Image (cartoon, helix red, strand yellow):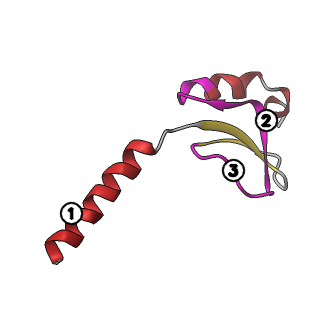
Amino acid sequence: MKKFLLAACAASFAFAAQAQTTEFSVVQGTATKKCTIVDKKPTVTTTTVVGDGVYRTRTEPETAMKTVKICTTN
């Protein structure tokens, strides 16, 4: 029984790792007005997504953050 449970846990972790894709976004804190890059889609109302939305690599939002007017004025 323990072997079966261990195998099921290992399979579920492997499946979750495959299904997970990394997406980056540039967000601005509503209180601080500071822009940051996050690797998960924001689900809280204390941040606002700025720029073009979702990026596939980390370098894309880093470049975009330099050109977004909201982020460069702070």
Depth check, mark 2 against mark 3: the one in front is 3
Q: Amino acid at mark 1?
A: Ala
Point out residue 67 in the picture as x, y percentages from the top left corner. Answer: 76, 21
**Residue 6 magenta-highlighted:** no
Q: Tell me where residue 44 sits by quadrant.
A: bottom right
Q: Amino acid at mark 3?
A: Pro
Label whose residue precedes the other's in the sequence (2 or 3): 3
Q: Is label 2 in contact with label 3 (beta carbons under 8 Å)?
A: no
Query: Which region is colored magenta?
Result: 39-60
Given residues 43 and 18, the one toward you in this image is 18
| Mark 2 nearby-residue class (10 Å; few <14, some 14–19, many ≥20) | some
Q: Could you tell me how many numbered marks the image carries?
A: 3
Above or below — where is 59 with respect to 39? Answer: above
Residue where numbered disc 3 is placed = 42
Q: Is 35 situated left or right of 16 in this image?
A: right
Q: Amino acid at mark 2?
A: Val
Above or below — where is 31 with respect to 26? Answer: below
Residue where numbered disc 2 is placed = 50
Q: Is label 1 in contact with label 2 (beta carbons under 8 Å)?
A: no
SS under mark 3: loop
Given residues 14 and 49, the one toward you in this image is 14
SS under mark 2: strand
Quarter of the picture containing the C terminus is top right
Image disc number at residue 7: 1
Label whose residue precedes the other's in the sequence (1 or 2): 1
